[in-house]
Amino acid sequence: MSPNVLAAFLLAFVATEGAGAAATPPARHVVDDSTGTRFDVTTKAGSTTYRCIGAGVRKVLFFKAYAAAFCIDADRYDEVVGRYVAQRHAGKSGDELRKALENDAAFFEHLESARADKLVIMQLVRDISKDRIASAFRESLSGVLPADRVDRLISTIPGDGKNGQRILIHSQGSVLVVDISGQANRLDDELIVRKLWRVWLGPASVTPSLKTSIARTVSQAH
């Protein structure tokens, strides 16, 4: 084989390898490793299309109660997440960025308070009573919401959750929707909409593995 033919062959091989790498499809799911629950990366609820950026598990004592995914308005992702990463963690990528985000409390506070529609999907893996859900909200929100606002939030819970059901809690501006298997209740309360996400993203998160997953997912996208 002449040198020119060999060079052309090597160039073609490298180009083919590069094209194959570029064609690797983006992830289609976020997965809670503990339960194996898969959530679509893109989910539509109401009029908003959400981008799900992490999944984790809620445990009660030694029992798994539900897998949860946290999602944000897909049209606002670059503004809310991408800009934060670029400004606060410039030059970091891969495992370095993952560790930095995982230990950055301000990052999760930023997600919690961002002026963007948000969605939490809860996939139940055991029966959960309405009283248990209410107790979790009271415990997580008592320090950031007045008691009457917590009670108002709890009033939107249609009833007990059953193993296998999927609960969608999502915001549309100042309106919060709590949907248990298609039975949805709404309330219009801007303060609740701003503070609710602390349940999953705050320092005392009920789903710490979700925060770890968010850090990993975001680092892989940047």
Image (cartoon, rainbow, N blue to C red):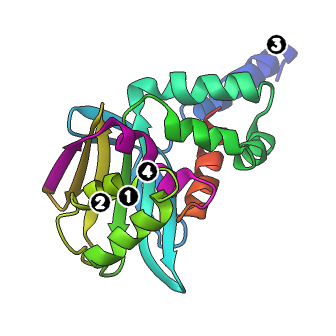
Of badges 3 and 4, the one in the foreground is 4
Residues at discs 2 and 1 in contact (Cβ within 8 Å) = yes
Assess whether residue 189 is covered by the magenta stretch. Answer: yes
Assess whether residue 138 is covered by the magenta stretch. Answer: no
Q: Earlier in the sequence, mark 1 or mark 3?
A: 3
For label 1, the residue is 147
Foreground residue among 94 and 151: 151
Q: Amino acid at mark 4?
A: Leu
Tell me, for residue 151, which label it has, or none: 2
For label 3, the residue is 4
Q: Position of residue 206 (x, y in %)?
A: 53, 65
Q: Earlier in the sequence, mark 2 or mark 4?
A: 4
Question: Crowding near pointer 3: few (<14 within 10 Å), some, many (20+)?
Answer: few
Marks 2/4: CA–CA distance: 10 Å
Q: Earlier in the sequence, mark 3 or mark 2?
A: 3
Marks 3/2: CA–CA distance: 77 Å
Could you tell me which secondary element the residue under label 4 belongs to?
loop
